[in-house]
Amino acid sequence: MSLKLDGKQLSLEIEEKLKKDIESYINTSKRPPGLAVIRIGEDPASGVYVKNKEKACSRVGIKSFIFHLKETVKQKEVEQLIHKLNLDNDIDGMLLQLPIPKNFDEQKLISQINPDKDVDGLNELNIGKLVKNEPAMRSCTPAGIINLLRSQNIKIEGKKIVVIGRSLLVGKPLSLMLLNLNGTVTMTHSKTINLNKICKEADILIAAAGKPNLIDSSFVKKGAVIIDVGIHRLTSSDKSKTRLCGDVLLEDVIPKVFAYTPVPGGVGPMTVTMLLVNTIFSWQKQFGLSSTLKDLLP
Ligand code: NAD
């Protein structure tokens, strides 16, 4: 039987540890870790993600500060808010909830976040350090995937790993993290020729294309590990029901693989947990406390 890489369970276990870490350091720091989330506009999915982050923070004892700005806010005003939060001693981590409306210069905003508070790991300094394999804030979804693999002692070193997708949020940083851990990584994308053949060689196949059910069993080597990053809400033909699915046609793939991540309950919960980890890591650093989280940071 195939092994389920249960992100929900692992994130609960990590959250328990995070809660204890905060409790044991709070006497020294005299304040809880603080996470600021900036949301612009009314994208409904972003609303759900921000709520989930807020709830996760309160479960472990992080204080969250939510800034929900109207779509009519000016780029300059968002930049001023970022600068203010950069200087705010109660804030250890900050993120811009993506996507933001097209009229904003997203990269310019992200590049103004203090790299030490950049808990999404998207600032160019943090990405540069990832390229150089130096310690820095690491982006959450890729870091969550590495922890899921490690939790079941799935070896990365020397393995053939194929990553589908090259986004700055998932595919690129993930490929670099796996490379830094001595995987033999192939990065693929929408213009890749013979995707099926390349995927079939993978010991670990990671799908982050954002295309529902793109990967069926014909893409997968027997005994491989498959990680499904995609998340899509599909509506039934009569529009009466919706259900979540990933980039992988799981029911077809599961019988063939050694291990897989479910959707929901796989990569998603780990993404939120790594946001908490990054925030607490930054808080510990701010107070010169020894980090209890190094093992979780790839
Ligand atoms: P994106 O659209 O920015 O990037 C998609 C990448 O996939 C691109 O590099 C593109 O070249 C590649 N691609 C598209 N179609 C392809 C195809 N047919 N064959 C091969 N490559 C193809 O998306 P993203 O932000 O990287 O997110 C990818 C998916 O992961 C989305 O479904 C997103 O919702 C999901 N996601 C989930 C989490 C989570 O926590 N579970 C976090 C981030 C993103």
Image (tube, rainbow, N blue to C red):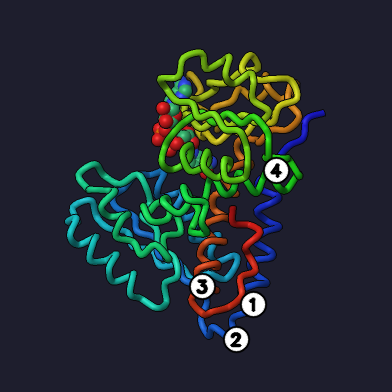
Q: Tag 3: residue type? A: Trp
Question: How many C-alpha atoms fall within 10 Å of the one at disc 3: few (<14), some, or many (≥20)?
Answer: many
Earlier in the chain: of badge 4 and badge 2, it is 4
Identify residue for label 1: 23
Which percent across, then down, holds residue 47?
40, 50
* Numbered mark located on residue 283 in the image: 3
Earlier in the chain: of badge 3 and badge 1, it is 1
Foreground label between 3 and 1: 3
Element marked by disc 3: helix
Q: Can residue 243 be seen in this view?
A: no
Image quarter of residue 252: top right
Residue lying at 70% horizontally and 47% vertically, measured from the top left: 150
Image height of 245 relative to 147, above or below: above
Q: Are marks 4 and 3 in contact (CB under 8 Å)?
A: no
Q: Tag 2: residue type? A: Asn
* Numbered mark located on residue 6 in the image: 4
Element marked by disc 2: helix
Earlier in the chain: of badge 1 and badge 4, it is 4
Question: How many C-alpha atoms fall within 10 Å of the one at disc 1: few (<14), some, or many (≥20)?
Answer: few
The alpha-carbon separation of the residues under discs 2 and 3 comes to 13 Å
Task: For ligand 1, give the image quadrant.
Answer: top left
Q: Tag 1: residue type? A: Glu
Q: Residue furthest right?
A: 1
Which percent across, then down, holds residue 44?
38, 44
The alpha-carbon separation of the residues under discs 4 and 3 comes to 28 Å
Identify residue for label 2: 27
Residue lying at 44% horizontally and 33% vertically, measured from the top left: 166
